[in-house]
């Protein structure tokens, strides 16, 4: 029985309810994680995208808050987005870790080649079947594994995946004013103050539509773009201050990156613009369906039997136009093997845009070019309890952000095209995150509780011996009853 009691004490010392790590003093931190959260000391994660923030946008602008974030955390030289370097496809790569030919969100525009119907970027956000075609975004994986996820304005937020949506969300309103700094701060307050702090979410993705819009309108070398980068920088400062005010800084990892960069469109009169209708031998009557006038890339479905003719005409059509049958696309672009891709894919050289019937594009800045073009590369910063401090790392592909996020959240990732090994150097140690710190706390608790258990065992032995001795003195026949009967439920401790 003494042995049984000691076993009980040891179990008590080891039980999760007793050995749980200390909780913070704020409501968002105190609330225990429910469900099957795999690691109780896991930190929260905020993924932020500033659309079109090129890797070098901080070089000609004073950016004190981004600089401080770099000193406090990790900064990459740049990151390489997937091809096609446009918004919805590239953001879905961040959320899934898959190249575009593997996740299937191949364009900002949903289209149906039979009905000729097209939905532009905003309306495409609501076409579930366009997004939900085999690759689960991290929100759904997190929810399935017991975590709480949220998303504000991030591409893909509005869609349902295998019958499930990100549970906490704010979908971008139509005709949203992307550059309103007051709105940005309201959104930051919502994500940090309400979602992370009050509602105890584990993961949130947060999207800003700038500096993309300004880069398109005024060009990446304009003073307007530089001013917008200052606004982004102030917002980064506001995000970190807001986390600090809610005492979240030591439990919140923050990753800031973007979907693509931006380059200047060559516009002066000496530029030989690419206009398909002007290419000798090209005839729109040979084309069943076209996706043109969206910057530097396009896709064509020639009518039956016309593919080879169209291909031969276009491949010699313009010195800055590259035409591929989709199966011949360079493998490094990972933009070949998906049924949604049309048979002919057209890519313009940096600075050129593709026009169909006549030039209609007036943007001073564009993206969508080959992801080897340096101007297409976004920036990357990360800060938080799991990241190294003041560490500069080399470039890497953005397919690797997903396995990093899964690791930080303690999630088992879905099949993906990235690797944790690419980013592991950014982390404080190579240990299995979330378990070692916890183990230290548990070990200290175990030692403390063992000491208490030892003391109680001594008290128990002395008390029992004393009681038995007394009873023996009073009722010499009761020893057997004591040993077999009520045991120690009524004993003195
Ligand atoms: Zn974008």
Image (cartoon, rainbow, N blue to C red):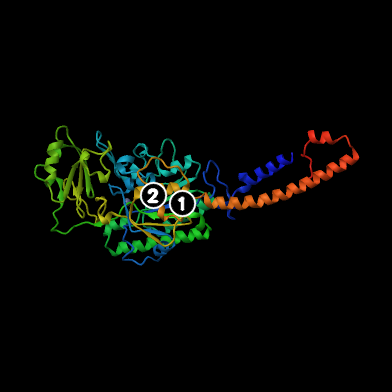
CB of mark 1 near ligand 1 (< 8 Å): no
Q: Residue at x 30, y 63 (%)?
A: 224
Q: Secondary structure at mark 1?
A: strand
Q: Is residue 218 above or below residue 311?
A: below
**Percent position of residue 62, x then y:** 36, 67
Question: Extreme right residue here?
Answer: 474
Real-space Cα separation, disc 2 to disc 1, in angstroms: 19 Å
Which residue corresponds to mark 1? 45
Mark 2 vs mark 1: in front: 2
143 and 483: which is toward the camera: 483
Q: Quadrant of residue 34?
A: top right
Q: If you read the primary sequence from the N terminus, does the residue marked by circle 2 or circle 1 appear first?
A: 1
Residue 89 lies in quadrant: top left
Mark 1 residue crowding within 10 angstroms, few (<14) / some (14–19) / many (20+): many
Tag 2 and tag 1, C-beta contact below 8 Å: no
Which residue position holds label 2?
Answer: 421
Q: Is residue 439 left or right of residue 388?
A: right
Q: Position of residue 324 (x, y in %)?
A: 19, 42
Q: Which mark is residue 74?
A: none
């Amino acid at each position: 029985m003494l042995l049984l009691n000691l076993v009980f004490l040891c179990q008590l010392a080891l039980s999760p309810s007793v050995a749980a790590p200390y909780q913070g003093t704020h409501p968002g931190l105190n609330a225990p994680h429910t469900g099957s959260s795999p690691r109780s000391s896991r930190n929260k994660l905020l993924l932020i995208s500033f659309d079109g923030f090129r890797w070098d946008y901080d070089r000609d602008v004073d950016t004190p808050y981004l600089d401080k974030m770099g000193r406090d955390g990790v900064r990459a030289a740049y990151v390489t987005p997937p091809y096609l370097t446009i918004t919805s496809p590239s953001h879905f790569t961040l959320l899934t870790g898959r190249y575009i030919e593997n996740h299937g969100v191949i364009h900002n525009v949903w289209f149906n080649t039979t009905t000729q119907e097209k939905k532009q970027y905003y309306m495409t956000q609501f076409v579930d079947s366009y997004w939900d075609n085999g690759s689960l975004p991290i929100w759904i994986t997190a929810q399935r594994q017991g975590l709480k996820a949220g998303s504000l304005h991030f591409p893909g937020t509005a869609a349902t995946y295998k019958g499930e949506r990100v549970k906490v969300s704010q979908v971008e309103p139509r005709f949203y004013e992307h550059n309103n700094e007051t709105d940005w701060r309201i959104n930051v307050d919502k994500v940090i103050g309400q979602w992370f702090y009050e509602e105890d979410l584990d993961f949130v993705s947060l999207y800003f539509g700038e500096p993309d819009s300004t880069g398109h309108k005024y060009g990446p070398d304009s003073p307007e773009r530089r001013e917008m980068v200052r606004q982004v920088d102030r917002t980064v400062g506001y995000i970190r201050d807001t986390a600090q005010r809610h005492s979240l800084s030591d439990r919140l990892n923050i990753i800031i990156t973007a979907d693509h960069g931006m380059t200047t469109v060559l516009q002066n009169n000496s530029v030989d613009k690419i206009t398909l209708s002007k290419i000798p031998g090209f005839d729109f009557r040979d084309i069943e369906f076209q996706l043109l006038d969206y910057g530097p890339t396009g896709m064509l479905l020639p009518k039956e039997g016309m593919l080879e003719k169209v291909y031969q005409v276009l491949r010699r059509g313009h010195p800055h136009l590259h035409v591929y049958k989709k199966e011949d696309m360079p493998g490094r672009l990972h933009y070949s093997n998906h049924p949604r891709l049309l048979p002919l894919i057209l890519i313009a050289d940096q600075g050129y845009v593709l026009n169909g019937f006549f030039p209609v594009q007036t943007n001073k800045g564009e993206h969508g070019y080959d992801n080897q073009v340096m101007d297409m590369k976004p920036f990357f910063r990360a800060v938080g309890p799991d990241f190294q401090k003041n560490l500069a790392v080399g470039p890497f592909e953005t397919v690797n952000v997903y396995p990093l996020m899964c690791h930080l959240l303690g999630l088992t990732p879905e099949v993906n095209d990235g690797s944790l090994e690419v980013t592991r150097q950014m982390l404080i140690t190579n240990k299995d995150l979330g378990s070692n710190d916890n183990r230290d706390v548990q070990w200290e608790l175990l030692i403390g509780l063992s000491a208490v258990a030892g003391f109680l065992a001594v008290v128990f032995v002395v008390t029992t011996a004393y009681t038995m001795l007394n009873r023996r003195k009073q009722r010499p026949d009761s020893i057997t009853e004591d040993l077999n009967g009520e045991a120690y439920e009524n004993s003195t401790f």
